[in-house]
């Protein structure tokens, strides 16, 4: 009988110890194991938040949500979230509290992003809030946009493409036939004989190119020689500039003298031309004149 009571006492003590440990663990997880300071945060949407939700400071656990109260403001309804943070924790005045989750399937928490202000918030004051982006709403919005795009844009485009596919296929077939004909003509042209001719043409072009290059070199030499000749002429002109001047003056005087006597010269040339015409006319009419001389008339004697 005493053994049974002893067993009951041991089992009861063990169960009591487990209950005490469970309560201590829950208290530790809820953040009520030590002194805390209360701060307020205001949100317009508290999706995923509840009493006991962890509160982090730059990813480090510092407290939990103590209460969530709806503020029925007619103009801007919102929720007041009271958070309990370890007492003495330094929270800069320009810090912000954001509703976030570390992963897609992770629980939603409040993460306080520390600011750079040297002044700390007083317990009971309000921390500036940052509204969280609803990932699922964004995904749903994107899905709706994709559905609208598929229904109003892609589907008509596919239908129009489907209507134009036979024409496209027909055009492709025509292009393939024309391409085959072109390839056949190229094969007819590119025969072994024509290939040999092309090789000879290319060889002749190469030889011609070499000759042109040689001619170009010769032209360069000729140009050099012409430059030398021009330089020599320039030097001669510079050296004989005085004599050339006198020659030009003499030539000018000669031309003036000829111009002054040009009328007499022209008259003499005209008379000479008439005499030559008369002489050539007599020779044509009586070539013997060249041998016998001019015949005298019958009534004229030599003594006369």
Image: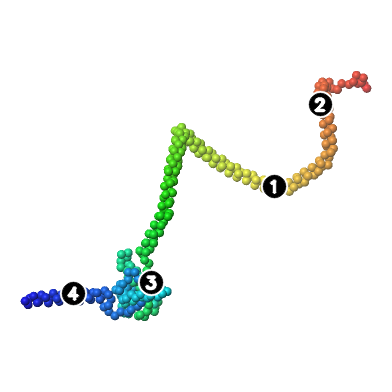
Residue named by callout 3: 44
Image mark count? 4
Q: Which mark is residue 18?
A: 4
Decide which of tag 4 and tag 1 comes sooner along the chain: 4
Quadrant of the rendered image containing residue 110:
bottom left
Residue extending furthest top?
298
Decide which of tag 4 and tag 2 comes sooner along the chain: 4
Q: Nearer the viewer, residue 13 or 155?
A: 155
Residue extending furthest left?
1
State if disc 2 and disc 4 touch (CB < 8 Å).
Answer: no
Q: Residue at x 13, y 74 (%)?
A: 11
Q: Which mark is residue 280?
A: 2
Q: Residues within 10 Å of mark 2 (few under 14, many from 20)?
A: few
Residue 76 appears in the picture as rendered: yes
What separation in Å lies between label 4 and label 2 (alpha carbons)?
Answer: 165 Å
Element under label 2?
A: helix
What separation in Å lies between label 3 and label 2 (alpha carbons)?
Answer: 137 Å
């Amino acid at each position: 009988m005493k053994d049974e009571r002893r067993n009951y006492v041991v089992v009861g003590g063990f169960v009591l110890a487990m209950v005490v440990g469970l309560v201590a663990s829950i208290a530790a997880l809820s953040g009520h194991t030590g002194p805390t300071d209360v701060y307020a945060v205001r949100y317009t949407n508290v999706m995923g938040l509840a009493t006991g939700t962890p509160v982090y400071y730059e990813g480090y656990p510092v407290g939990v949500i103590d209460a969530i109260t709806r503020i029925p403001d007619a103009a801007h309804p919102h929720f007041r979230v009271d958070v309990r943070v370890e007492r003495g924790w330094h929270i800069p005045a320009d810090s912000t509290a954001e509703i976030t989750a570390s992963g897609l399937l992770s629980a939603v928490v409040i993460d306080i992003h520390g600011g750079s202000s040297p002044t700390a918030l007083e317990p009971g004051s309000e921390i500036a809030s940052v509204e969280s982006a609803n990932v699922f709403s964004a995904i749903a919005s994107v899905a709706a946009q994709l559905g609208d795009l598929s229904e109003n844009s892609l589907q008509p485009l596919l239908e129009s493409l489907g209507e134009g596919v036979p024409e496209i296929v027909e055009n492709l077939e025509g292009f393939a036939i024309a391409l085959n004909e072109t390839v056949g003509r190229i094969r007819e042209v590119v025969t072994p004989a024509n290939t040999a001719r092309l090789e000879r043409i290319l060889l002749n072009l190469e030889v011609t190119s070499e000759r042109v290059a040689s001619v170009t070199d010769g032209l360069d030499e000729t140009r050099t020689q012409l430059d030398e000749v021009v330089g020599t002429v320039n030097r001669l002109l510079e050296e004989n500039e005085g004599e050339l001047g006198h020659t030009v003056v003499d030539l000018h005087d000669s031309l003036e003298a000829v111009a002054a006597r040009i009328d007499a010269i022209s008259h003499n040339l005209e008379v000479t031309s008439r005499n030559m015409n008369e002489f050539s006319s007599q020779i044509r009419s009586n070539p013997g004149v060249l041998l016998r001389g001019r015949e005298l008339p019958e009534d004229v004697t030599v003594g006369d």
